[in-house]
Amino acid sequence: MTSRTLVTYPEPPLPSAVGLGTAGLIYGCDYNPEQWGPATWSEDVALMREAGINLVAINIFGWSHVEPRDGEFFFDDLDTVIELLQSNGIGVNLGTGTSSPPPWLSTRHPEILPQVADGTTRWPGGRQAWCPSSPVFRDRALRLVEATVQRYGSHPAVKLWHVSNELGCHNALCYCDVSAAAFRRWLQARYATIEGLNEAWGTAFWSQRYSDWDEILPPRATLSFLNPTQNIDFSRFSSDELLSYYQAEAAVLREHSTIPVTTNFMVTAHIRTQDYWQWAPKMDLIANDHYLDNRLDVPHRELSFSADATRGLASGQPWLLMEHSTSAVNWQPLNRAKTPGEMMRNSLTHVARGADGVCFFQWRASVQGTEKYHSAVLPHAGVDSRVWRESVELGALMGRLGEVAGSTVHADVAIVFSWEAWWAADFEAHPSSELRYLDQVQQLYEALWSMGVTADIVKPGAALDGYRLVVVPSLYLVSDEDAAVITDFVAGGGHAVISFFSGIVDADDRVRAGGYPGAFREVLGVRSEEFYPLGTDETVSLSDGSTGSLWSELLHLTGAEAWVTYADGPLAGVPAITRNAHGRGVGWYLATAVDPAALIGLLATITAEAGVVPIGTVAPGAEVVRRRSQERDYIFVLNHTDQPIHHEFRGFDLVTQESVDGFASVAPGGVHIIRQDRKTS
Ligand code: GAL
């Protein structure tokens, strides 16, 4: 690329709102200077300033560079890069570098390599090839962390510690003998006695009764179906194991440094191995990575869900988008470039839903290695490119949006979401393999999204005070205590929508006998005696003219009224949607997957009755979200269509820098961010 003269730019605002410094939003990227010679570093940093970048993540995959041989540390390059960033007013998000072990480690200690369920080893040559329970890996990794924090623990440029990288992205589940021993220790702590484990796992079934802890294995590949509780416990153990690894690194960092510590979560449709409800309280700030999944029907709606779930993990406080892409990724079957404006909309959707910063993977597109066809802020084409120009444009806007930092999103609706229920519901040997937990969560989420209703994503058992409506999609596994929170919420005057295959089993995956939906029979005033799942492409007509799919059941009313019944098929005349007055509130049951238009109609009735107030009238294809500070509201209107979209908000648009007084039009694919003074508007 041609060399460019370094011009003077205003100091980029230093990151803050998530507790990292002064005022403003974070605009950042991953930077892998070790992939380039020092000759590019100055140009990189000059261009970062041009783009408005104020936080740069480095040393994410730095281990083999920083410790090229066992116990020999080489920090000179990191010193140079950190100083260069600092002298340009750019903060550092410093990786501990432990994500991928260097070849010398796996060659000397092949016992750190992970094994998959069939007992075969996963070898080096990719990344993250380490067993989460390996004491040898942990020892060497913590030695590197110690050396790194001793060097940079009070460096003024370092704003954040970035532990490892996407813990569990590839190595979440390891089935080796070391993991088996760790799994047994975890089970002993959970159950205390082998009888307790036998009881919880239902080992009377298929002659699985254990007489000694040493007989227990991870759920390795079997000839037939697996014990489901063994499988759920292995998922719990595996999530806890990597969390304990995170905590071990964090403890070393905190011993020598007061800089905040975090790691990047993966709240996404295709990775589900970490129970982030357990992880979140251990983070100094919540950070998430999100990539558009073009295999989905409407990828940007899943982005919104991920952002809302991340806000839930942050307990409603601002959070940080640690990674997303400027354009295509390299790991889907077809890697689509983003359309003009799409990257801006993606970024601002995260901000709208509570992010106080957005960062990209990565700064400069690699020319070697697996990720060379992954987009970057600075693409192969260089600065004469759409991606670069849009990145600079976004950086300038992020600078102008500084006042949004620290404001929060408020919702009348909560959606209960559970990684444990996800693991349990999607397991084998169930009534229908077509029922996928996340699909059910997202169908209800998407209906609310289309209506412009913002929802918080909360964990089972979360306090529901302050919400008007709680939505409970297919919460298959739920403890009695967590189910009672929902029942009590309704009894106290709240409204609930609960969909099929909820409340079925307890935390041990034990069916609640007496009729479905088990834990929610009372609040819903129904009792179901048998499931009638529907085949792919099979539908059933409903009495209001809509259709159901996927699921139906032989439901009896025990207090509820039938709102809609099946109009044909083996269950003709049986209730499909019910409404139950319970205490001072109302519990709705959806016993089938209602078609999308009818679901929106039904939710319009339910939200109106519950007193949920939409932010404004929403045109189809628009996304409207509000952030709120002490004095001001910020209304984000995102136009995902190729037509102009009108809105009637009053205030000042931070994007166009123009006043709007009750009628404005967002250009196709564009965004408005309307600032309103709460006292005067
Ligand atoms: C993430 C990872 C990055 C990069 C990116 C590509 O999973 O943290 O290092 O690989 O995906 O999309």
Image: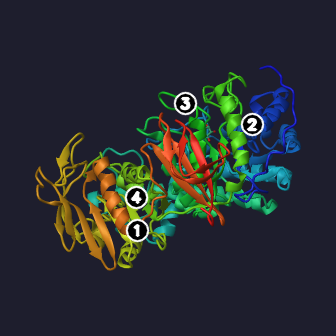
Name the secondary structure under disc 2: helix
The image position of residue 409, as x and y in percent, is: 57, 60
In the rendered structure, the answer to whether residue 570 lies left or right of residue 411 reads left
| Mark 3 → mark 1, Cα distance in angstroms | 38 Å
Q: Which residue is mark 3?
A: 339
Name the secondary structure under disc 1: loop
Q: Residues within 10 Å of mark 1 (few under 14, many from 20)?
A: few
Question: In the rendered image of this protein, does residue 557 appear above or below residue 40?
Answer: below
Name the secondary structure under disc 4: helix
In this rendered view, identify the residue nearer to me: 478 or 171: 478
Mark drawn on residue 421: 4
In the rendered structure, the answer to whether residue 340 lies left or right of residue 71 reads left
The image position of residue 675, as x and y in percent, is: 63, 54
- What kind of residue is marked 4? Ala
- Residue 103 seen in the figure: no
- Marked residue nearer the N-terminal end (4 or 2): 2
